[in-house]
């Protein structure tokens, strides 16, 4: 029989438990007193607000003009879409299709004509 019932018995002395009885050292707290905090804030703040320079816009004048024009066109598109009803949109679409030449027609697909 290869199985022996009972507890597992280890040979030799028991293994020591790691860090048994060793206490962890407490770290010193780095608390900043309110006096130190006020002094450091006062030192970093400028005396005048006139020294503060606002960052410039990184876009070129052409980019600014382009964005304004695109916003204006978008407003016009939204306004036009809001004024048309569904029926008017379909009528405009059908007029556009009627004015197209036959080149734009979709050819019929037939298994006999390949």
Image: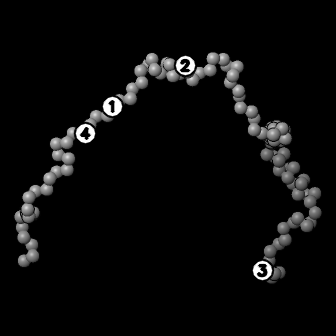
Q: Residue under label 3, please give it.
A: 111
Q: Which label sits in the foreground, 4 or 3?
A: 4
How far, Cα to Cα, is label 4 from label 1? 13 Å
Secondary structure of the residue carrying numbered label 4: loop
Secondary structure of the residue carrying numbered label 2: helix
Residue 92, image x and y in percent?
87, 49
Q: Residue under label 4, please give it.
A: 24
Q: Nearer the viewer, residue 38 or 113?
A: 38
Q: Nearer the viewer, residue 102 or 65?
A: 65
Q: Quadrant of the N terminus?
A: bottom left
How far, Cα to Cα, is label 2 from label 3? 86 Å
Residue at 84% across / 71% down in the picture? Answer: 107
Q: Is residue 76 visible?
A: no
Count the marks.
Answer: 4
Q: Residue under label 2, please give it.
A: 42
| Labels 2 and 3: the sequence-earlier one | 2
Contact between labelled residues 3 and 1, with CB atoms less than 8 Å apart: no
* Residue 78 drawn above or below residue 3: above
Contact between labelled residues 2 and 4, with CB atoms less than 8 Å apart: no
Secondary structure of the residue carrying numbered label 3: loop
Q: Which mark is residue 39?
A: none
Report which quarter residue 114 is drawn in.
bottom right
| Labels 4 and 2: the sequence-earlier one | 4
Report which quarter residue 108 is drawn in.
bottom right
Q: Which mark is residue 28?
A: 1
Contact between labelled residues 3 and 2, with CB atoms less than 8 Å apart: no
How far, Cα to Cα, is label 2 from label 1? 27 Å
The crowd level at tag 2 (other Cα within 10 Å; few <14, some 14-19, many 20+) is few
The crowd level at tag 1 (other Cα within 10 Å; few <14, some 14-19, many 20+) is few
């Amino acid at each position: 029989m290869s199985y022996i019932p009972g507890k597992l018995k280890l040979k030799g002395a028991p293994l020591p438990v790691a860090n048994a009885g060793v206490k962890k050292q407490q770290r010193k707290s780095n608390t900043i007193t309110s006096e130190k905090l006020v002094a450091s804030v006062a030192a970093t703040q400028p005396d005048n607000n006139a020294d503060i320079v606002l960052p410039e816009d990184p876009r070129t004048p052409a980019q600014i003009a382009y964005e304004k024009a695109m916003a204006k066109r978008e407003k016009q598109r939204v306004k036009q879409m809001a004024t048309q009803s569904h029926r008017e949109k379909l009528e405009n679409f059908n007029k556009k299709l009627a004015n197209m030449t036959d080149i734009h027609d979709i050819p019929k697909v037939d298994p006999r004509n390949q």
